[in-house]
Amino acid sequence: MRILITGANGLVGKNLIEDMHFSKNKIIATASDTKKLAKFLNKNNLKDIEVRQLDVLEPRKCGILIKKIDVVVHLAAITDVPFSLEHPKKTIDVNYNGTVNVLESMRKNKVKRIVFPSTQAVYGNNINIKETDVKNKSPVDFYSLSKLMCEDTIRAYSSNCEINYVIFRASYLYGKHQNKGLLPLLLSRAMKSDVVNIGNNVKRDFLNVKDFTGAITMAMSFKKNNIFNIGTGASTSIKEIIGMIAENLHKKFTIVKNRSLVRDRKIERWDELANIQKLKKFGWKPKYDLRTWIKHNIPHS
């Protein structure tokens, strides 16, 4: 298969390339910053990957590259929720209009399959929701809103243009090649001080990125349209993570609620737990455990 990945510089893109580079598939990895991507590939000895520059907001460039492709894995997006709250127009522009440009190029060039990462955040503060429950989709921020808009548009292109899709509503990702996000931030704070500042003590369903890329790889061969929740089916609070870090460092931490880190209650997601029963029926299950991952990856000095 010829597989084109957008947003290959991101957490999921890097891990997906790493997982697939030994396969017989032809991988075209695209990113706006190709120097950064090439540096990553060279550092990790990932060979035979075709690297191309692509900004998904450039429809002409999308049309040139998204041609004679079997599967598009469309990862390019703004995923930072605080950034989306400060820059709603840019977030919707990149995430939604960028997706429309990808879909239009697929339509014009008769590319028939897309794999798209959405988010559990489309459910807002509703947890353990089945994929078919349309009443409980209530995004509370511009990032999750943009993803829900993309979902609806992908389904419309599928109905009208014969494009097959698999959409994953992913829970909170962590893992290899991650240099920003909640878990690296907590680890950094814990290494620097015995006092750890936090905002709201929210809970998330922490999904290892390797479990996610495994599901994406599996979905590339799916012939039918589908939407899947993906996570672990378990929820962990920030304070519980700090406890896991303390356990491995043999330290005690003082947890301080810092008002500058507290998000407005109206736009906070307090809990997250993915209902993954449907995906399990397709043979997928999470392999990585958060507590074990922290134990094996925490710096001890």
Image: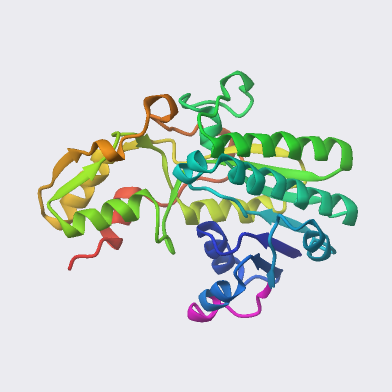
Residue 279 in the image, given as x and y percentages of width and height: 58, 39
Task: Residue at 44% x, 32% y: name it.
Answer: 273
Assign the N terminus to one quadrant of the image.
Answer: bottom right
Colour scheme shown: rainbow
Task: Residue at 50% x, 28% y: name it.
Answer: 124
Asked if residue 54 lies in the magenta stretch, the reply is no
Asked if residue 44 lies in the magenta stretch, the reply is yes
Residue range in magenta is 41-51
Residue 24 in the image, given as x and y percentages of width and height: 70, 72
Residue 276 appears in the picture as rendered: no
Left or right? Give the position of 178 relative to 296. Answer: right
- Image quadrant assignment for residue 125: top left
Residue 227 appears in the picture as rendered: yes
Residue 218 in the image, given as x and y percentages of width and height: 63, 53
Number of labels in the image equals 0
* 38 relative to 84, above or below: below
- Image quadrant assignment for residue 122: top right
Assign the C terminus to one quadrant of the image.
Answer: bottom left
* 148 relative to 101, above or below: above
Residue 191 in the image, given as x and y percentages of width and height: 19, 59
Q: Which of 127 and 86 is in front in this view?
A: 86
Q: Nearer the viewer, residue 37 or 90?
A: 90
* 190 relative to 233, above or below: below
Task: Residue at 54% x, 57% y: name it.
Answer: 12
Q: Which of 269 and 114 is in front in this view?
A: 269
